[in-house]
């Protein structure tokens, strides 16, 4: 990727493509060539596209348009093969995050506000290949990250106040994508919840959070059991809030991004404890 500031990147499951939020472009890792039109010129990571995602089948890439304080933003889904825009939806406020589930045929986008004491946010989920919106809701918190489970049966969201401080608590919510019933509302992050990620088998959910403002309190990453909603483990950040978290494709590594950098941790012990039982859908 070109040198510059990025707020998020997405790597395809088989490591063929990479996309970054500075320009919104998709790059072929074998040839280092850009495949999609570049977004408008931006001066930094918080003024450019903030959300980017690549589908599990590596056929689609989604990204938000650059943030502008005076208007709503658009979120687009492109075909990687042809570059054609397959889906475009408008989001209120500040479009933050996107997620794609090729197995469920769904595309999700979220929004929020920054520099406000009271955030408002929204989630919109649509079918990729139709105009049908299957779920839409507004919230009193910003929604900073979305993640579909690998089988597309669940959608998780990291929520909270952008300028959270004191005793404010972030929230991790999980919905059943068949009927949009909320399955879990997981609490525990002091401040704001910034990021969520399922492991490749869908048995675990990782979340990252903490106060964005400079405080002496460390943020943390939490690992949740998807069968029960139980918190399995808490890992403190190295510096300030934990802003990002993700599993490696084999679940053996857990990557944590905070104000001090990126740390890789051994995720192997999380694979077998406790014994996994599928979450009932009815």
Image (cartoon, rainbow, N blue to C red):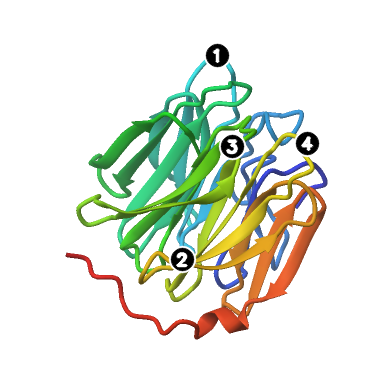
Q: Is the C terminus in the top left, top right, bottom left or bottom right quadrant?
A: bottom left
Rounded to the nearest whole Å, what is the CA distance between mark 1 and mark 3?
Answer: 31 Å
Q: Is residue 213 left or right of residue 187?
A: right
Rounded to the nearest whole Å, what is the CA distance between mark 4 and mark 3?
Answer: 15 Å
Where residue 279 sits in the image (x, y, percent)? Answer: 29, 71
Foreground disc of the pair 2, 3: 3
Q: Which residue is mark 2?
A: 56
- Does the rendering let one see residue 18? no
Q: N-terminal of the two: label 2 or label 1?
A: 2
Q: Which residue is mark 1?
A: 70
Foreground disc of the pair 2, 1: 1
Mark 4: few, some, or many residues within 10 Å (few <14, many ≥20)? few
Instruction: Specify the quadrant of the image occupied by residue 152.
Output: bottom left
Foreground disc of the pair 1, 3: 3
Q: Is residue 240 left or right of residue 267?
A: right
Q: Which residue is mark 3?
A: 167
Could you tell me which residue is drawn at 68 percent across and 43 percent down?
Answer: 7
């Amino acid at each position: 990727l070109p040198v510059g500031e990025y707020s998020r990147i997405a790597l395809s499951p088989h490591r063929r493509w990479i996309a970054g939020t500075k320009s919104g472009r998709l790059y072929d890792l074998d040839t280092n060539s850009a495949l999609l039109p570049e977004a408008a010129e931006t001066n930094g990571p918080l003024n450019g596209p903030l959300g980017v995602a690549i589908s599990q089948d590596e056929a689609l890439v989604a990204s938000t348009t650059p943030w502008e304080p005076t208007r709503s933003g658009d979120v687009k889904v492109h075909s990687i093969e042809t570059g054609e825009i397959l889906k475009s939806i408008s989001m209120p406020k500040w479009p933050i995050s996107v997620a794609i589930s090729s197995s469920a045929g769904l595309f999700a986008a979220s929004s929020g506000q920054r520099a406000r004491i009271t955030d408002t946010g929204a989630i919109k989920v649509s079918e990729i290949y139709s105009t049908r919106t299957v779920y839409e809701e507004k919230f009193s918190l910003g929604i900073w990250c979305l993640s579909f489970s690998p089988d597309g049966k669940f959608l998780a969201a990291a929520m909270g106040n952008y300028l959270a401080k004191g005793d404010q608590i972030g929230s991790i919510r999980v919905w059943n994508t068949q009927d949009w019933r909320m399955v879990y509302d997981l609490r525990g992050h002091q401040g704001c919840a910034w990021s969520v990620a399922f492991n490749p088998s869908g048995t675990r959910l990782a979340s990252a959070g903490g106060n964005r403002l400079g405080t002496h309190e460390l943020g943390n990453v939490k690992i949740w059991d998807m069968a029960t909603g139980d918190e399995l483990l808490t890992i403190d950040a190295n510096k300030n809030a934990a802003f990002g978290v993700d599993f490696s494709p084999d679940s053996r590594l857990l990557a944590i991004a905070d104000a001090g950098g990126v740390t890789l941790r051994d995720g192997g012990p999380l694979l077998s404890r406790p014994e996994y039982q599928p979450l009932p859908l009815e």
